[in-house]
Every structure is written in C-alpha cells, then in structure tokens.
Amino acid sequence: MKKRKMFYFTIGVKLGDRLMEFSFDANSSSEARKKKQELYDMLDEILGKEDIIEKPETVSSEDAITIQVYPIEANVKLLHEYSNFWENGVIVEKVESPLLARIKKDTSVVFEITPREFEKVVTEIYYALGFEVELTPFVKDGGKDIIVIGNDENEQRFVHFIECKQHNTENPVGVSIVRGFESIVRRETANMGIIVTTAYFTKDAKKERKKYYDGVIEFEEFHKLIERIL
C-alpha cells in the first residue's frame, strides 16, 4: 500500500457549556493551511476576530464564545503517535500503533483506554487479519462500530458487522445486547454480526445465541481475538 503523509486539524467552538468541533484532514501542509484559513474566515464572519484564540492548550469561558485551535504541526505529531492514517473511517496506511503494541504485551491496558480507542484497536486487529475494515462514526453509527468485508473459502464476498463492548470483567454481555444487535444485522442484511468484549458473555446470552442466532451472531472475547495476531 502506498504510504502518504496526512495532516489533521481541529477547531473547537465553545458556546457556554456546548462544544462544537470542526475537523478535516489534508494531503499536504499547504492544503491544510488553506482549509484552516477557510474555517477562520467563516468563523470570523460569525464571531469576530477578537474571539479567535490559537493555542494548543484548552481555552474555556463560561460567559463568552471562545475558539480552540490546535496548530497543524501538533496534530501531525499526534497522528504519528497513533501511527495509522484514517480517511473516512478507513485505514489508508498501516503501521502498527504503539497502543496495540502495548496491549500485545499487557492486555490489561485495554481497560485503561477510551471506548473509541478500543474500537480503533479492534479495527486494527481485523485489518491485520487481512480484512477490509471501516470504523463507523463514534455517534450515529447505526448500532455497529466496525464493518468488515472479506471473501469466504468459496471466494464469495461477505459483510460482517462488529459491535465493541469495552466492559469490565464484572459486567458481562447479556441477552438484551445480543437481541438488539441481531435485529440490526438482519435489518441491514449483513452476513453476520460479531460482538467483541473485554469481559465475557452470560450463560443466557450463549444459550440464546446458540438457539436462535447461530450463524447470525458470533461472540469474541478480546483476549482470544488478540492472540490471533501475536
């Protein structure tokens, strides 16, 4: 896969206790700066230049609108720290992230990361297993976190949905989660749905899957999933 350097930029607009974010990626620093200026011009018309504050630190105000701007250079560094370059939810350059490397050495790290980071790690694993993968938006994902595309042993194309449940070991995945996910898989006519959890599945969930959803829903415990790429 051809490597490409990408730049990521975010502007956060805070209005009281509400925060809106504008973000984009670009193929070059010049393109990123052009897009940055376009956002500045738009916000200038709405808010006025005196309200625009460019700092890498968080800027907050209870009474006024403030704008937080992360410099382009800082976000290039952040992107490299994660190591994978994403475009519309798809990995466009594959380099194993330091986070995944840490989890390979110590799976307990998976309980220290954010839910979104967990979804990205699961996406990386399925990518490493040779599938096409797409990470859905963090909100309004339609009940599925990851879309996996591949070919079966007969070279027939298939689509699997993945739902990630970053639960602690005292909070297993129960029947209600399985039922809800099963309805999404059938409604959107995916070939199968896979629930990946850092915890485990209740006995009732396993019985229900076997009795009603066998071949439609599969279970995957995270520690076993990651063993497949070690």
Image (tube, helix red, strand yellow):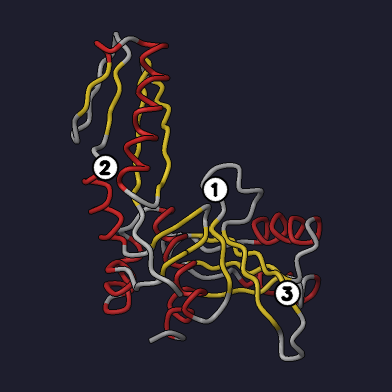
- Residue at coordinates 31% horizontally, 61% vertically from top-left? 82
The numbered dot on residue 137 is 1
Label 1 CA crowd tier, 10 Å (few <14, some 14–19, many 20+): some
- Residue at coordinates 31% horizontally, 72% vertically from top-left? 103
How far across and how far down the image is residue 195, in percent? 60, 67
The amino acid sitting under disc 1 is: Pro
Q: Which residue is mark 3?
A: 158
As drawn, is 144 to the left or to the right of 130? Answer: right
Q: Nearer the viewer, residue 9 or 223?
A: 9
Q: Nearer the viewer, residue 57 or 179?
A: 57
The numbered dot on residue 88 is none
Q: Earlier in the sequence, mark 1 or mark 2?
A: 2
Q: Is residue 154 above or below residue 63?
A: below
Report which quarter residue 98 is drawn in. Answer: bottom left
The numbered dot on residue 72 is 2
Q: Is residue 156 above or below residue 95?
A: below
The amino acid sitting under disc 3 is: Phe
How far across and how far down the image is residue 178, in percent? 68, 61
